[in-house]
Image (cartoon, rainbow, N blue to C red):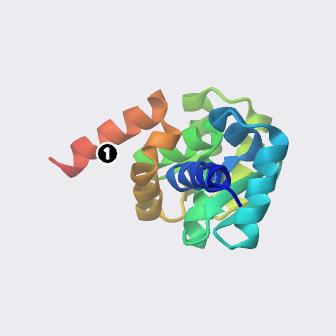
Amino acid sequence: MTEYDLETRQRIFDLIKEEPGLHFREMERRLEMATGLLEYHLHYLEGKEVVVAKEDRYYKRYYPTNLDARDKRLLSSIRQKNPRRIVLFLLLNSSATHKAIMERLSFKPSTLSLYLEDLVKKKTLIKEKRGRENMYCIAEPDRAERVLLAYKRSLLDEIVDSFLETWLEDVYR
């Protein structure tokens, strides 16, 4: 093993630690690293149990091994923009119907249904039947807020910024 290998592995691990849940292609882009080289070092880090890979529908996501399993699942849910928008909306509104989410976030009904189904399956959301409608809420709102705050840099976009500003205003009032 060379000093270059150690530096390369450290760069990979630092990125995973800083932004848990990144998928392979995103790491490849951010590190500007060749596919084979990244695969080799990720395989090594997995073998040494420094990082763990989790399959997430279309992606293989990487996490430090010391990250809580529920945090991994939550990060996996909110890594993509649209599911993150839904989670942020529900954090700000405590619960909402399919129709309310659809109207506020401008989703097509079938598209929203797919996202909601996936978020319920990953235990990020809870679905409750109320009369003829389904209500959705965050399964662990405190955890979701903590994870968003802890990893805001890796999830940064205007929606997260808006949520965090609103949330912080409420906390410090």
Residue 24: quarter of image: top right
Give coordinates of residue 40: x percent, y percent. 81, 54
Q: Where is residue 154 drawn, in percent x and y?
A: 51, 42
Quadrant of the image occupied by residue 162: top left
Position of residue 11 measured from the top left corner of the image (x, y, whole percent): 58, 48
Nearest to the observer: residue 1 or residue 32: 1
Up the image or down, 32 lies above or below 73; here it is above
Q: Along the horizontal axis of the image, is 21 left or right of 164?
A: right
Residue in view at x 45 percent, y 60 percent: 141
Q: Is residue 52 left or right of residue 163?
A: right
Q: Quadrant of residue 61?
A: bottom right
Q: Which residue is mark 1?
A: 167
Residue 57 visible in the shown view: yes
Image side of residue 109 versus residue 140, left or right: right
Q: Residues within 10 Å of mark 1 (few under 14, many from 20)?
A: some
Looking at the image, residue 166 sits to the left or right of residue 78; the answer is left
Q: Secondary structure at mark 1?
A: helix
Observer-nearest of 144 and 115: 144
Kindly identify the residue that appears in the image at 45 percent across and 41 percent down.
153
Instruction: Give whichever of 111, 162 is nearer the camera.
Output: 162
> Does residue 126 appear anywhere in the picture?
no
- Disc 1 residue type (three-letter): Trp
